[in-house]
Image (cartoon, grey):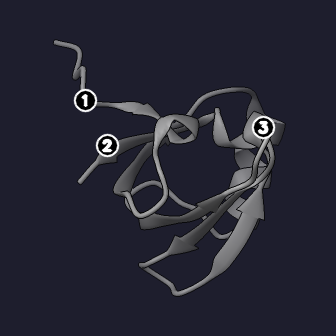
């Protein structure tokens, strides 16, 4: 059965918290996401969203890192809102 609560990171609003479920895309994009310190099972919080399709600034609550990611990469991060 498919879980309908799973969504892409780009659809969350500032202040929202979510748990990373998986990544879509190829091996290179999955490796890039993990190099940014984001792994399946991590809990993240959206700090801010850039205007006009800009970057998304997130905090990884699991390891304490903060990173700004582009919408292309953010669209490949599948999360479950908390």
Which of the two discs, 3 and 1, labels the residue nearer the N terminus? 1
Q: CA separation, marks 3 and 1?
A: 23 Å
**Element type at mark 2:** strand
Which of the two discs, 2 and 3, labels the residue nearer the N terminus? 3
Label 2 sits on residue: 80
Q: CA separation, marks 2 and 3?
A: 22 Å
Q: Is 75 placed left or right of 1 in the picture?
A: right
The residue lying toward the viewer, choosing from 35 and 54, is 54
Report the disc number at residue 65: none
Between marks 3 and 1 in the image, the one whose residue lies nearer the viewer? 3
Q: Is 42 placed left or right of 82 in the picture?
A: right
Is 54 placed above or below 38 here?
above
Query: Which residue is farthest bottom?
Result: 64
Residue 24, percent from left and from top: 60, 28
Callouts 1 and 2 close, C-beta under 8 Å: yes
User: Which residue lies at the image location 24% right of the left edge and 20% below the top edge?
Assistant: 4
Which of the two discs, 1 and 2, labels the residue nearer the N terminus? 1
Label 3 sits on residue: 53
Query: Which residue is farthest front?
Result: 51
Label 1 sits on residue: 5
Between marks 2 and 3 in the image, the one whose residue lies nearer the viewer? 3
Is 60 placed above or below 77 here?
below
**Element type at mark 1:** loop
């Amino acid at each position: 059965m498919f879980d309908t609560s799973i969504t892409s990171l780009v659809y969350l609003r500032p202040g929202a918290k979510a748990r990373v479920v998986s990544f879509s895309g190829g091996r290179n994009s999955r490796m890039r996401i993990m190099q940014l310190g984001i792994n399946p099972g991590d809990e993240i919080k959206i700090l801010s969203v850039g205007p006009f399709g800009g970057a998304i600034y997130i905090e990884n609550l699991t390891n304490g890192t903060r990173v700004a990611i582009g919408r292309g990469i953010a669209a490949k991060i599948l999360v479950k809102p908390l």
